[in-house]
Image (tube, rainbow, N blue to C red):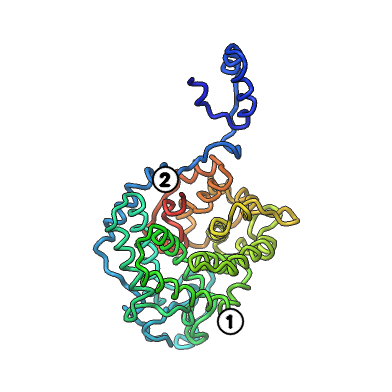
Amino acid sequence: MALLKLRTCYLSGKLFLMMNVKCKRLILLVVFPIIFSCNSPSSDKIITSLEINKLERVRVLLQAKKYFNEKPITVTASQCERSASGIHDYYSEGDYWWPDSDNPEGAYIRRDGLTNPANFNDHRLALRRLSLIVPAFTGAYKITGERKYALKAIEHLKAWFVNPETRMNPNLLFSQAIKGRSTGRGIGIIDTIHLVEVVKAMIFLDEKGILEKEILEGLRTWFSEYLNWLTTHPFGIAERDNGNNHSTCWAMQVAMFASFTQDSEKMDFCRNFYKDILLPQQVSENGSFPLELNRTKPYAYSLFNLDAMATLCEILSTEKENLWEYKTPDQISLKKAMDFMFPFIQNKSDWPYPPDVMYFDEWPMRQPALFFSALAFNNIDYSDLWKTLKTDSEEDEIIRNLFIRQPVLWID
């Protein structure tokens, strides 16, 4: 009977035949060495929801406890004197733009890769705070079933997207502004990557029937309006066509928000955009991202773009259309990009390119690309490495670039 509990993987068909002959044949099967492949399509998943819940329980509940008495803070809580925006508008400033030492009162100048600490960041920080709080509460609700956590998440969602007094306007007309040059730019759309996991939490809460009809309608209205702005406004079009990680993050956001608003047309557009534009234009023959390698933070940007592409595939893949398995005519695929970066996540000292100008020592973290790829390809090497990496950071640069933090929400 014990033999029947063995994981058979590729040998399952042969074992079935052997089970229908005399018992001595079964004994022969035991004494011969057998190698089982954990990457077989027929094998059990290497990461299960039960395992993730157990792995994450203490961490998630500690976060939920930390945030439990926190009140919502939205864009209406602070304003910047340099902004042309109104009280309900999101405002941010370009990271790498600094005062000109030769003309301190003039237009800012660019210093790529070097973040200006004097920028107005209140709205960015508030948005990231939301992206920490709502998924943590929702994760705690999923793990424990305790309604109090879900209600806390909904409190913050209502403040940001529903309540007239505190809600944010559904556009980014004033993001990534540059003093003396621009009141806002399409490139600022990347700031709302932190809504991706928030929306994933919203989808879970909706599936559990815990969102009241009025709140659900308010949330869907906000994201439908924002989705329309992302796909029609010149800023959105410019971000879509930017060409590097900005294009990837535009598609990832559109796909996630369209999933929540049930906009199948926009989801189909993103699938084709991934296959026809993102893969062939961004991934090289060896699996690297040349546009990211040319930046002053080549390691972090390569990880970031890989995370965004993997998240996009996770959002959009279905049994009928599996983007994880898709290859271009030139055999470019996400698997190739994953295999390129994997050795350097394992051992950063082997990185053959220049180190990042800032925060190089902070990476890698528990990259979502590893987690999603482990699930998609049933790859135990990916999952084993993912489990060893650091989960959270107090460094703002890491929080800014690590936008998937609660794996419990991403696995059934």
Residue 223 drawn at (x, y percent): 46, 73
The residue at which mark 1 appears reads as 234
Q: Report helix, strand or loop for mark 2.
A: helix
Q: Is residue 409 visible to us here?
A: yes
**Marker disc for residue 316:** none
- Residue found at x 42% / y 45%: 52
Q: Report helix, strand or loop for mark 1.
A: helix
Front one among 375 and 307 = 375
Point out the residue furthest to the right here.
329
Task: Report crowding for label 2: few under 14, some 14 to 19, many 20 or more residues within 10 A (C-alpha).
Answer: some
Front one among 228 and 236 = 228
- Cα distance between the residues tagged 2 and 1: 41 Å
Residue 103 drawn at (x, y percent): 48, 87
Residue 82 drawn at (x, y percent): 41, 86
Front one among 6 and 304 = 6
Point out the residue furthest to the top here.
24
Look at label 2 and name its amino acid: Ile
Dots 2 and 1: beta carbons under 8 Å?
no
- Residue found at x 57% / y 76%: 231
Specify whether 165 is left or right of 283. Answer: left
Q: Looking at the image, tell me whether mark 2 or mark 1 is earlier in sequence order.
A: 2
- Residue found at x 43% / y 45%: 49
Specify whether 344 is left or right of 69. Answer: right
Residue 104 drawn at (x, y percent): 45, 85
**Marker disc for residue 52:** 2
